[in-house]
Image (cartoon, grey):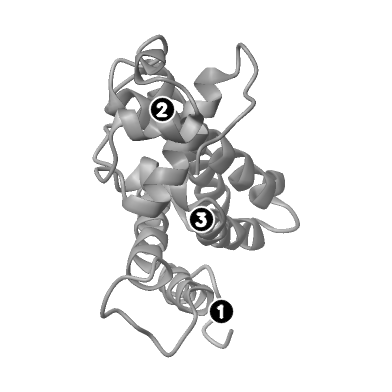
Amino acid sequence: MRKQGYHHGNLRQALVEACLSLITEKGPTGFTLSEAAREAGVTPAAVYRHFEGREDLIAEAARQGYEIFTALMEFAYDNGKPTALAAFEATGRAYLAFAKKYPGHYIAMFESGISVNRTPELAATSAKARAVLEESARGLSQRIPEDRRPPATMVSAHIWAMSHGVVELFARNSPGQQSPFDPEALLESAMGIYLRGLGLIPPER
C-alpha cells in the first residue's frame, strides 16, 4: 500500500519503513528499490538521495534493528538482577521476543546476507548487542571455578546459536518444521540442559 504524507526530512525513515514492510512480505531479495519507493510514496530517483542501492537500504534497516534488539537485551539483562542466572535466562527469551515482534528487522539482520561489517555504524550496533549477552554470560560464569570456566564469549555464542536455531526452525513458520512444544519452552529447556552441564543449575531443578 502506498504511503502518503511524509514530511521533508523523514524520507530516509519512510524508505526504511517501506523496506521493512516489503522484507516481511516478500523476503530480503523479493523487492526492488522502485517498489520501496512506491511503498513510501516517492519517485525511484528520490531513493538515491539517501541510499546507493537495495543492500544499503537493508543495511540501515538492520542497523535500526540492532538498536532495538540491544535495548531489549539490556532491559532483559537489567544489570544482572535479580540474579545472574535469571538475568542470563531473560536475555535468551528476549531474543525470541524480538524475532516475533520485529520480523522485518530480524530478517534484515540475520537472513538478508548483509554483512554486519558493511558499514561502521552497523558493525558498532551489532557489537553492542553481542556485548550485552557476553556481559550476562561473564556474570553467570563467575560461579564456575576459574580452571574450568569457559570463556564468556563462548557461553554467549552457544546461547545465541541456540536461540537463533529455535527461532529459525520453530518460530519463523519454516515449511515442514513443527514441534509439539512452543519456542519459549524449547529454548528454556535447552538452556537448562546447557547450564546444568556447566554446573550452574542444580540437577534437581
- Relative to 73, 160 lies left or right: left
Asked whether the viewer can see residue 130, the reply is no
Of 107 and 165, nearer the camera is 107
Nearer mark to the viewer, of 3 and 1: 3
Question: Residue 107: horizontal and vertical position, in percent?
Answer: 37, 48
Q: Point out the residue furthest to the top here.
A: 49
Alpha-carbon distance for marks 2 and 3? 31 Å
Depicted 179 relative to depicted 159: above or below? below
C-alpha distance separating marks 3 and 1: 25 Å
Q: Secondary structure at mark 3?
A: helix
Q: Where does residue 132 sit, x and y in percent of width and height?
A: 54, 41
Q: Amino acid at mark 3?
A: Tyr
Q: Nearer the viewer, residue 130 or 139?
A: 130
Report crowding for label 2: few under 14, some 14 to 19, many 20 or more residues within 10 A (C-alpha).
many
Check disc 2 and give the amino acid type.
Answer: Ala
The residue singled out by tag 2 in the image is 37
| Mark 2 or mark 3, earlier in chain | 2
Q: Which mark is residue 95?
A: 3
The residue closer to the viewer here, 184 or 90, is 184
Separation of disc 1 and disc 2 at Cα?
Answer: 55 Å
Residue shown at 24% from the left, 43% from the top = 29
